[in-house]
Image: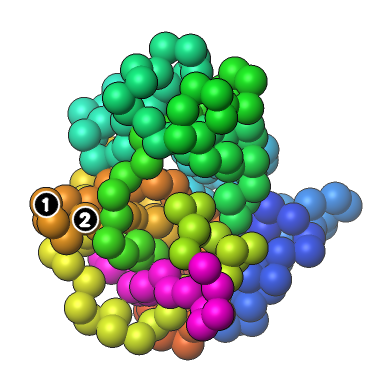
Amino acid sequence: MKLRVLPYSPKSASAKKLAEAIDAKRIRLEGSDYEYTDGDLVINWGNGGHRGYPGMLNNPSAVCLSINKLSFFKTLASRGVGHLIPRFWTRGETIPADQFPVIARTKVEGARGEGAVLARSQDDMPGDPPLTTKLFPKTREYRIHLGRTPGGQVSIIGKLTLLRYNGYDHSDIQNQANGYFHSANNADAVPLAVINTAEAVFLATGLDFCAMDVGYDSVTDTAVVFETNTAPALEHKDVMEGYKAFFALYTKGIVS
């Protein structure tokens, strides 16, 4: 029985870190000599285009749905958790005037806010983007790492808070380019509404593990999921230890 990590790219730094941390080998995307045998465990780290293996955590089809933000939102709306994501539109001209400001997404598979444009009126819309979401009045944003245990229970792997470097102006598009970063400080103070929302949406995705970016409005004590990441950065020790403990639930008797 073997333990392997299937990366979304051979250049994935987080896949490399994970494989080293759990003493696993990475599967080459081209020219691999790996042959699956019964009992093997393959951890799919963000690869939505692979054919998959019988013993795999994160089915590629579920990963693919999560990578594409439009498919992700449509799927969640059809699975009964549409109230836990921002209101969204697929045709810009149908957005009512009283729903602005919005975030127009010219790329549905962009990372780190790529292709996201803040529009305060129809005049600001970048043409007819494939996906536009209502700007949620968040007080704070969190990244919640979750996993599904072998018994089907939801496990919180790690919790991070989105913070801003000193000297940067506030931006409605809070990404790395605008001076924001994730911190493990005050992780225990994550509101219960954030945890409950993340868990409910996670169960609707069909994923076995992921990191969810969740916005929280302290005025209404409500939260929404902005997106999910199936190959998250593993820069924080507590998060890495959380993933090691989570995958250990599946790897008893498996060798690298």
Q: Is residue 202 magenta?
A: no
The answer to whether residue 39 is visible is no
**Marking on residue 217:** 2
Quarter of the view holding residue 231: bottom right
Q: Which amino acid type corresponds to the residue marked 2 in the rendered image?
A: Asp
- Taken as a whole, is the magenta stretch helix, strand or loop? strand
Q: Residues within 10 Å of mark 1 (few under 14, many from 20)?
A: few
Q: Residue at x 50, y 53 (%)?
A: 173
The outermost residue toward the right is 31
The answer to whether residue 197 is visible is yes
Q: Residue at x 21, y 46 (%)?
A: 200
Residue 196 higher or lower than 255, as above or below: above
Q: Is residue 155 magenta?
A: yes
Q: Is residue 180 left or right of residue 101?
A: right
Give the percent coordinates (x, y) of residue 9.
Answer: 74, 55
Q: How many angstroms separate mark 1 from mark 2 (CA)? A: 6 Å
